Amino acid sequence: MRAILAGEGKTLYYLARQFTAKGHHITIVDRHPDECEALARRLEKSVVVLGNGSDPAVLEDAGARQADVLVALTPEDQDNLIACQVARQMFGVPRVLALVNDPDNEEIFKRLGVTEAFSATRIIATLLEEQAALEEVINLLPMAEGRIQVAEVVIGEKAPARDKTLQELDLPADTLVAGIIRAGDVHIPRGNSRLYLGDKVILIGRPASFGEALRAVAGEEA
Amino acid sequence: MDRSDLYIIVAGCGRLGARLASELSRTGSSVVVIDRDPSRFAALTAEFSGFHLTGDAIEQEVLRSAKIEQADCFLATTNQDNINLMLAQVAKVIYGVPLVMARIYDPLRSPVYERLGIDTISPTELSAQEFLRMITARAGLEPASALRNGR
């Protein structure tokens, strides 16, 4: 995959490092000369272009005509939007992804032709809210751009799911207990599997029903 | 639509924004001018009888409090091209404002935005054309066709 990453700061560096390690061809666009120098030194396999990703001349230099994807992750929403639109409309880049800093812009970006817009603020806020509400939830991560959530839930003393079989649980339709971790072993459960104190449950589901599923397993105040 | 009863939003109260807002207000339009720096509103003339709103027009909340969904015309005149281009699209596509115009300094990207029905005005282009026109007129020269055709 040929990807152009337009951004700045540490996120840009770590993302480029990760993609390069997986064998993708990465071109970095950064408007700060000092960062460009450091990036070129640290990421030997990447091409680094100095400039603003919303400037057509800069994108052309970065090989936009051959790129499969452009990711815009500067701290300025307007620059990210315009970079995506220029990449798509002037250079035909098939997929354009943008970080939105203001969560309100997520929907707007999609309506203005950005393939996928993701808001770090919203993702973190969702994580925090659900973590704070449920201390028994050890890990919670959104997958498929947030359309599916996965969590690891501990069955506590007052958990409604304690000593019940999965059939007896009142789980919403689009959620699923995908695994039970008991004494270090992983069990793939069936309907008649029973949950005991101290079990860790891997729960998967759509975000809309996820809160309800967590409450059914771990309880209200958990 | 009678020219005198338009509802117009001007985003960015710099020299251009203040000038346009003042003139449109003087000729009878209802004008709301938005800028994140309230000291900018001092540039509006005494004839300006519209409203000013302190805030960042790039935030939806600010645009909604300017009643953008009722606007007949939206002018994006901040000093940043990308902000103007984003605002113009939001006004046109999200809120359906009928007449939307944006000032952009760099005319290189105009083709992208013309397709979206957003009129862009480039001060660089306008100045260049005017300079060339004056040079041609005063010096009695034939206009260089390559320059004349530059948009």
Image (cartoon, helix red, strand yellow):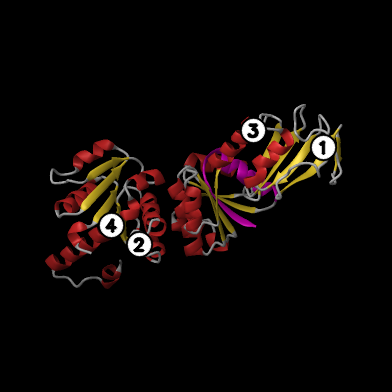
A115 or B48, nearer to the observer:
B48
Badge 2 vs badge 3, beta-carbon distance below 8 Å: no
Q: Nearer the viewer, mark 1 or mark 2?
A: 1
**Residue B116 seen in render:** yes
Q: Chain of mark 4?
A: B
**Measured Cα–Cα span from mark 1 to mark 2:** 61 Å
| Label 3 to label 1: alpha-carbon separation | 24 Å
Which image quadrant is residue A221 in? top right
* Stretch of the chain drawn in magenta: A1-22
Q: Nearer the viewer, mark 3 or mark 1?
A: 1
Q: Amino acid at mark 3?
A: Gln
For label 2, the residue is B118
Q: Earlier in the sequence, mark 3 or mark 1?
A: 3
- Image disc number at residue A164: 1
Q: Which residue is mark 3?
A: A131
Q: Which residue is mark 4?
A: B124
Q: Residue at x 18, y 49 (%)?
A: B22
The image quarter containing residue B98 is: bottom left
Left or right of residue A153, residue B69 in this image: left
Residue type for callout 1: Lys
Q: Give the residue drawn at x 22%, y 47%.
A: B18
- Magenta residue check for A13: yes
The quarter of the image holding the C terminus of chain B is: bottom left
Estimate the x, y position of residue A117 in percent, counting from the top left. 54, 51
Residue type highlighted by circle 4:
Thr
